[in-house]
């Protein structure tokens, strides 16, 4: 089943997605108003910020890895209204970590 279309309401939406990528996570950025070379420049800036690869597909930016929080902070600083979507924003401790993990 296809995902519902993203509304064009001036809100930049950041999704975490793994579908069709062999289980690898990407951060998907919908709703940026830039087009053409300006959008490519924005992609380059976001890739540098995250230290990750990425691509532009049909006006949507895809950055390798889950970088929603970092990207949201940068986009807000640039004046965009940002909404996080598509998954939890909580961070899990690696196994063995935390109070019950047995680490000294």
Image (spheres, helix red, strand yellow):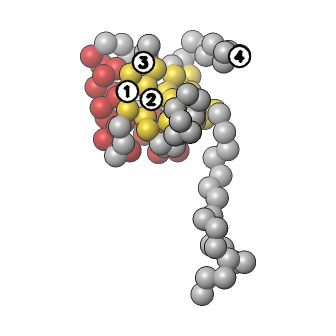
CA separation, marks 1 and 2?
Answer: 5 Å
Residue occupying image coordinates x 61% and y 82%: 103
CA separation, marks 4 and 3?
Answer: 20 Å
Residue occupying image coordinates x 67% and y 77%: 101
CA separation, marks 4 and 2?
Answer: 21 Å
Q: x, y percentage for residue 26? A: 50, 36
Mark number displayed over residue 57: 3
> In this picture, is 68 found above or below 55?
below
**Dot 1 or dot 2, earlier in sequence:** 1
Residue occupying image coordinates x 37% and y 27%: 55
Asked if labels 2 and 1 touch by Cβ distance under 8 angstroms, the answer is yes
Furthest toward the bottom, the residue is: 104
Which element type, helix, strand or loop, lies under badge 2?
strand
Asked if labels 1 and 3 touch by Cβ distance under 8 angstroms, the answer is yes
CA separation, marks 2 and 3?
Answer: 8 Å
Which element type, helix, strand or loop, lies under badge 1?
strand
Assign the N terminus to one quadrant of the image.
top right
Report the mark closest to the observer, 4 or 2. 4
Report the mark closest to the observer, 1 or 4. 4
Asked if labels 3 and 2 touch by Cβ distance under 8 angstroms, the answer is yes
Assign the C terminus to one quadrant of the image.
bottom right
Residue bearing the label numbered 1? 55
Q: Give whichever of 16, 76 is nearer the camera.
A: 16
CA separation, marks 1 and 4?
Answer: 24 Å
Q: Quadrant of residue 79?
A: top left
Label 2 crowd bin: few (<14), some (14–19), many (20+), radius 10 Å: many
Q: Give whichever of 20, 58 is nearer the camera.
A: 20
Mark number displayed over residue 1: 4
Residue bearing the label numbered 2? 62
Mark number displayed over residue 63: none
Q: Is residue 56 visible?
A: yes
Report the mark closest to the observer, 4 or 3. 4
């Amino acid at each position: 089943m296809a995902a519902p279309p993203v509304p064009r309401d001036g809100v930049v939406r950041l999704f975490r997605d793994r579908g069709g990528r062999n289980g690898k996570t990407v951060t998907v950025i919908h709703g940026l108003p830039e087009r053409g070379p300006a959008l490519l420049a924005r992609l380059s800036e976001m890739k540098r910020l995250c230290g990750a690869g990425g691509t532009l597909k049909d006006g949507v930016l895809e950055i390798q890895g889950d970088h929603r929080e970092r990207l949201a902070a940068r986009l807000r600083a640039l004046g965009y209204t940002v909404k996080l979507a598509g998954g939890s924003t909580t961070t899990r401790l690696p196994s063995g970590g935390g109070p019950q993990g047995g680490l000294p």
